[in-house]
Image (cartoon, rainbow, N blue to C red):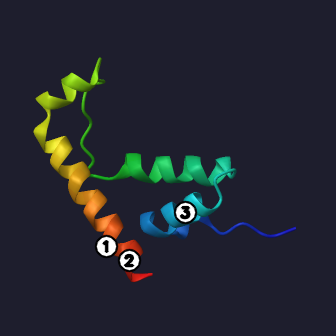
Amino acid sequence: MNQKPNFKTMTSKELKTYVLSHRDDDEAFYAYVDKVNERKDRVVYPPLNSLEDLEQYPEVIEQMRQESRNNFQENELT
């Protein structure tokens, strides 16, 4: 039986990578969600009722685009 890593000592990026490669590991997923919720710079938006509601939050769209670009660039390098 493989011993799991210590999720509390992992960075958010390390934990995200682990969760994406171990999608059936609920404990890792919840540890990642806890880590995200602890972030001081986390922004919470109200729930959307439709995709059209997203137009009211252009900063969210821009953030999603930037993250997508960053993820694409990271994946190109590996």
Give the Cα distance between marks 2 and 1.
5 Å
**Local crowd at mark 3 within 10 Å, few (<14), some, or many (≥20)?**
few
N-terminal-most mark, 3 or 1: 3
* Residue identifier under label 1: 73
* Residue identifier under label 2: 76
* Residue identifier under label 3: 8
Residue sitting at x 28%, y 67% = 70
**Local crowd at mark 2 within 10 Å, few (<14), some, or many (≥20)?**
few
N-terminal-most mark, 2 or 3: 3
In-front residue for pair 28/23? 23
Instruction: Spot the residue most to the bottom.
Output: 77
Q: Do the residues under discs 2 and 3 have CB atoms within 8 angstroms?
A: no
**Local crowd at mark 1 within 10 Å, few (<14), some, or many (≥20)?**
few
Q: Amino acid at mark 2?
A: Glu
Question: In which image quadrant can residue 73 be found?
Answer: bottom left
Residue sitting at x 68%, y 52% = 25
Q: Position of residue 74 (x, y in %)?
A: 36, 74
SS state under label 3: helix
Q: Amino acid at mark 3?
A: Lys
Question: In which image quadrant can residue 37 be found?
Answer: top left
Instruction: Spot the residue most to the front.
Output: 76
Q: Is residue 61 above or below residue 70?
A: above
The circle on residue 36 is none
